[in-house]
Image (tube, rainbow, N blue to C red):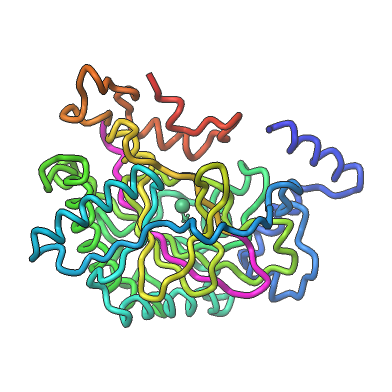
Amino acid sequence: MESSKTQLDLVLKGSGYDIEKEIKAFDESKAGVKGLVDSGIVKIPPFFVVPENVVSSQPTPAHLQIPVIDLKDTHGDPVRHEKVIQEIRSALEIWGFFQVVNHGVSKAIMEGMIEGVRGFHEEKNEVKKEYYTRDVKKKVTYTSNTLIHKTKAADWKDTLYFRMVPDSPHPEELPVVCRETTINYTAYIRGLGDTLLKLVSEALGLNPDHLIEFGCDKGLKIMCHYYPPCPEPNRTLGSKSHTDPDFLTILMQDHIGGLQVFHQNQWIDVSPIPGAFVINGGDLLQLISNGKFKSAEHRVLANHTGPRISVASFFAIYDRLCGPIKELLSDENPAVYKEVPLMEYIAQYMWKEQDGGMTTLDRFRL
Ligand code: OGA
Ligand code: NI
């Protein structure tokens, strides 16, 4: 895999194109992918180009859709409650993904957040530039392609990032166009996160408070993505294939579409449903569930139309050792993962290429 980058480098160098220099200029512009589009380019720069076979345009078979789970009356009605737990268990075992409706977050809160994110990304460059940084210690940042120097091809997107829990930023640290909407949205996402973590605990056959007592809700990061329209959507990706480095992700996507999950050896579209959230289990859930719940690979296609806006909320902590939950293990179900120092896991996730089909989590298998 690494050699493909080297080869591309050589070819480009031979043609007088210096990829490192181009990336540096792009980064220093602090204007992101949106800046490129606004400048009127009709061909994408070579450092966004993925190998030809990557973006396949095979349509999703109509019968294959991630499950949609209705959370209405999950609290009050014991029969509904049990049904929802079973649906979540089956969705996380088979897909690693599902959508939820009737989750208690109003359309006004959701749309408010999307519009706030749009407002930020469509702000004048002088305003956005103030937030542009690769400093991972900052609680509020705006960047295009956080790991641009590591990746083989850059993604066609820009990201506004908030670390909301623990130690949330002061309101004044949030960009003014999306300050109020982000604070409101975060409160609801924390509530929905707790609801889901309880249901997921029960889906594992544990006490409802198990995952919360473990601290799964003690860290929350929110990434607000902006995928500008792309002049050559068949040559790049909005987000390259990845698994999420967390327990659980709550994703809100707008109506444009492009999210796909890898399932039974093919890419399946996650079709936007107005008012729904997409929920997926991350690597840490796969780890603590001893592989029972899947952390599925997913990606986002680039699109001629746009911008596409999405907001991904990640529940994760990295300040401890973490292995398969003891109550889930038995002679018939022995641990398949080691106890993992999560700091080491996240460092590997951030800085090592996933090579030869091996994911970061695979490195911690027994
Ligand atoms: C992510 C992610 C999907 C999307 O941020 O990890 O997978 O639709 N986002 O933006
Ligand atoms: Ni993701």
Seen from this angle, which residue lies furthest front?
63
Q: Quadrant of the N terminus?
A: top right
Q: Is residue 319 magenta?
A: yes
As drawn, is 48 to the left or to the right of 203? right
Residue at image coords 33%, 72%: 182
Q: Position of residue 234 (x, y in %)?
A: 72, 59
As drawn, is 271 to the left or to the right of 237? left
As drawn, is 75 to the left or to the right of 10? left
Q: Quadrant of the C terminus?
A: top left
Q: Position of residue 279 (x, y in %)?
A: 35, 57
Please say if 162 is above or below 335: below
Nearer the observer, 314 or 64: 64
Residue at image coords 63%, 63%: 302
Please say if 325 is above or below 62: above
Q: Is residue 317 magenta?
A: yes
Asked if residue 313 shows in the view, the reply is: no
Please say if 53 is above or below 188: above
Residue at image coords 38%, 40%: 283
Asked if residue 133 shows in the view, the reply is: yes
Determine which quarter of the picture holds residue 210.
top left
Q: Position of residue 340 (x, y in %)?
A: 33, 27
Residue at image coords 11%, 63%: 75
Nearer the observer, 324 or 158: 324
Q: State the extent of the magenta-drawn residues as a range.
A: 301-321
Nearer the observer, 110 or 44: 110
Determine which quarter of the picture holds residue 308.
bottom right
Q: Position of residue 335 (x, y in %)?
A: 29, 22
